[in-house]
Amino acid sequence: MKYSGVLLLPIIMISAGCGIAPKQPQPALHDFGVPYSRHESGQSAKPAVKITAPKWLWDNRIRYRLLYAAPTQVRFYALDRWIAAPPELLEQQLIGGTTSLDYLLNIRLLDFEQQFESSDRARAIMRFYLEAYSPDDKRLLGAQEFRLEQATQTADAPGAVTAFAELVQQAEDKIQAWLAKLPDAAKRNGRNNVSSAL
């Protein structure tokens, strides 16, 4: 019986230590911000946008690369993540911020990462390949590869998130301008009285 107190003391100390151990901080979750709605009144149709990507981009971690130190090594921020994988976020952003389109858009996301040129200078990189099809006969109307980059305001995770949000807006503008130059863009817009606003 006299040993019971001696044996219980380490157990109590271990239990107390577990109770006061600091909790690991949870990662902050980010998206690209609230899409700017370009839907006109009376229009409810959504553009058909499909995003595909290599399997390594179907990850909600924010990727970065130190070009000046280890250019072949991909790293991830521990305390900042996307709320969903970038291809899914991009698809929802494009659908939520566009008017009705008379196109079927297939987009393959190729690159989506932050690249550090030095310890205090970084940029966000986004590269994708776009195909536009006619919705009626599924005819390929055009294809184009886009590469966009945006310098980050700060060389860290918040800087990366802000830069990527800006890149997505740039992508919408670039796609809109490209669609307007398709051979039958004017004919389609005139016939349906719908402006291409991706």
Image (tube, rainbow, N blue to C red):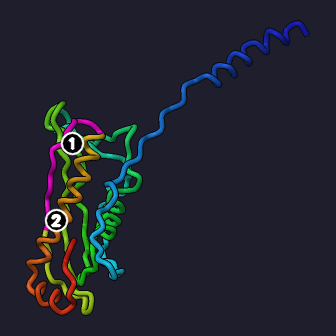
In the visual, does 29 lie left or right of 50?
A: right
Expressed as whole percent of the image width and height from the top left, the position of residue 150 reads 16, 49
In the figure, residue 119 lies in which quadrant? top left
Q: Position of residue 49 (x, y in %)?
A: 30, 74
Q: Which mark is residue 72?
A: 1
Mark 1, other Cα within 10 Å: few <14 / some 14–19 / many ≥20: few
Q: CA distance from mark 2 to mark 1?
A: 31 Å
Residue that lies at the very extreme toward the front in this rendered image: 41
**The C terminus appears in which quarter of the rendering?**
bottom left
Q: Dot 2 corresponds to which residue?
A: 173
List x then y, in percent, for residue 107.
Answer: 25, 69
* Disc 2 crowd, CA 10 A, few/some/many (<14, 14-19, 20+): some
Q: Amino acid at mark 2?
A: Asp
Q: Which span is picked out in magenta?
A: 145-157
- Residue depicted at 33% across the width and 41% down the height: 76
Left or right placement of residue 49 versus residue 131 in this view: right
Looking at the rendered structure, the secondary structure element under dot 2 is: helix
Task: Residue at 35%, 60% (x, y): give it.
Answer: 89
Q: Position of residue 73 (x, y in %)?
A: 25, 40
Q: Is residue 14 above or below residue 30?
A: above
Q: Is residue 3 above or below residue 192?
A: above
Vertical comparison of 87 with 22: above or below: below
45 vs 1, nearest the viewer: 45
- Would residue 3 be counted in the magenta stretch? no
Give the residue displayed 34% in from the left and 82% down from the top: 42
| Residue 110: mark in rendering | none
Specify the amino acid type for callout 1: Thr
Q: Secondary structure at mark 1?
A: strand
Residue at position x 14%, y 63% in the image: 146
Residue extending farthest right: 1
Q: Is residue 17 visible?
A: yes
Q: Are marks 2 and 1 in contact (CB under 8 Å)?
A: no
